[in-house]
Amino acid sequence: MGVSREQQLDELIAKQALTELIYDYCRACDRMDQEFLESLYHADAYDDHGHFGSGPVQNFLSFTAEHDWRKPFGIVQHNITNVRLKVAGNYAEGESYVHAFHVIESPEGPYDVIFLGRYLDKFEKRSGVWKFKHRRPVVDMCYRIAPSPMSLQVPMLDGFHVGRNSPEDPSYPFFTLFKRGRA
């Protein structure tokens, strides 16, 4: 006997919620929104973020809260591709490819770090809400480019709004439905 239409719809709804959770993580990181980032994990979750904090998620979240992430990062942008999800009731697993671009300010001048990898995720749905249970970034490739050739001082960009990894990002006054600290 096959899977019922209702089961298929439940799985699609779960996969959409999980995909949005993955995207929300990227927005929280790119806008350096600590409150939003913390809301995406279960309190007993794990995160394997290398020197940024591995083990209980509080290690990672404490690192991001204690260090003003905006200081070293001039620009940060995460892009997600190839999202694969498997759902089993209130538990799910997923792999998503990430391309992350960072301009890092240093005493020697800015340099770029381009990270290509994957997020390996375990999710749980509790009280009707999907959150990360265990997140493991995996590095497949990384490029360090010094000095950074990135520049927003290009004539064709005159008059454009410039993104910020802070509450001053142009998206906050533009949108009424997207607010800092929540989806």
Image (cartoon, grey):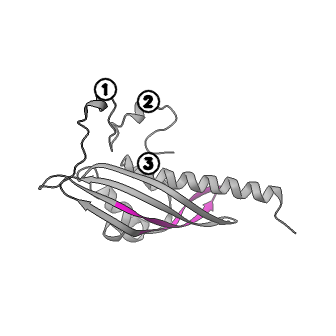
The residues colored magenta run: 115-138
Q: Earlier in the sequence, mark 3 or mark 2?
A: 3
The residue carrying mark 1 is: 159
Residue 151 lies in quadrant: top left
Q: Which residue is rendered at x = 23% and y = 36% of the image?
A: 153
Q: Which residue is rendered at x = 44% and y = 55% of the image?
A: 38
Identify the amino acid type marked 1.
Answer: Gly
10 Å neighbourhood of mark 3: few (<14), some, or many (≥20)? many
Viewer-nearest residue: 153 or 52: 153
Q: Which residue is rendered at x = 33% and y = 44% of the image?
A: 165
Alpha-carbon span between mark 1 and mark 3: 24 Å
Q: SS for tag 3?
A: helix
Q: Earlier in the sequence, mark 2 or mark 1?
A: 1
The residue carrying mark 2 is: 174
The residue carrying mark 3 is: 27
Q: Is residue 15 above or below residue 171?
A: below
Residue 11 lies in quadrant: bottom right
Alpha-carbon span between mark 2 and mark 1: 16 Å
Q: SS for tag 1?
A: loop
Answer left or right for 146 relative to 100.
Answer: left
Answer left or right for 134 relative to 48.
Answer: right
Q: Which of marks 1 and 3 is nearer the N terminus?
A: 3
Q: Residue 147 carries which label?
A: none
Residue 81: image location, x then y, percent: 51, 56
Answer left or right for 79 relative to 146.
Answer: right
- Main SS, magenta region, reads strand
